[in-house]
Amino acid sequence: MSDKREWQTAVSHPMIYRIRIKGHLESQWTDWFDGLTITLEEDGDTLLVGPVIDQAALHGLLKKVRDLGMPLVSVVQIQVSDV
């Protein structure tokens, strides 16, 4: 079992996520996606990248993807150096 202090430290800092969805999402949706960076990939996918404060916020973002009707390709927690 992990140390409670380590868990509290991890929770106190937002995690960076990379959410890949099928299809292109225009930059006007940035505010709706809580300021995540929107990058349109050449393969037709869209990357949403940025900090997510907690699991509830992550689920909220995923719900928004669902509500748009865009297929979710992947959700990856990334290291700050990978951004």
Image (cartoon, rainbow, N blue to C red):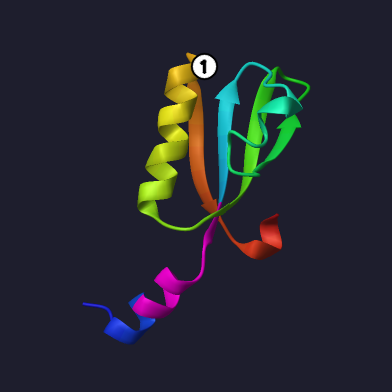
Q: Is residue 14 magenta?
A: yes
Number of marks in picture: 1
Task: Point out the image quarter for the C terminus.
Answer: bottom right
Q: Is residue 57 magenta?
A: no
Say which quarter of the image contains residue 49: top right
Q: Which residues are magenta?
A: 8-16
Residue type marked 1 = Met
- Of the 4 image quadrants, the one containing the N terminus is bottom left
Res 6 → quadrant: bottom left
Of residues 12 and 24, the one nearer the viewer is 12
Percent position (x, y) of residue 29? 66, 28
Residue located beneath label 1 in the image: 70
- Mark yes or no: residue 3 visible: no
- Where is residue 18 drawn, in percent x and y? 58, 44
For this rendering, which residue is in front, 56 or 18?
Answer: 56
Rendered residue at 58%/32% (across/down): 20
Q: Residue furthest front?
A: 31
**Residue 5 visible in the current orientation:** yes
At 56% from the left and 25% from the top, the residue drawn is: 21
Most distant residue in the left direction: 1
Q: Position of residue 60 (x, y in %)?
A: 41, 39
Residue 53: percent from left, percent from top? 48, 58
Is 3 on the left-hand or right-hand side of 72?
Answer: left
| Within-10-Å neighbours for mark 1: few <14, some 14–19, many 20+ | some
Which residue does the image show at 36% across and 78% down from the upper left?
8
| Residue drawn at (43%, 45%) of the image | 58
SS under mark 1: loop
Looking at the picture, does residue 69 appear above or below residue 62?
above
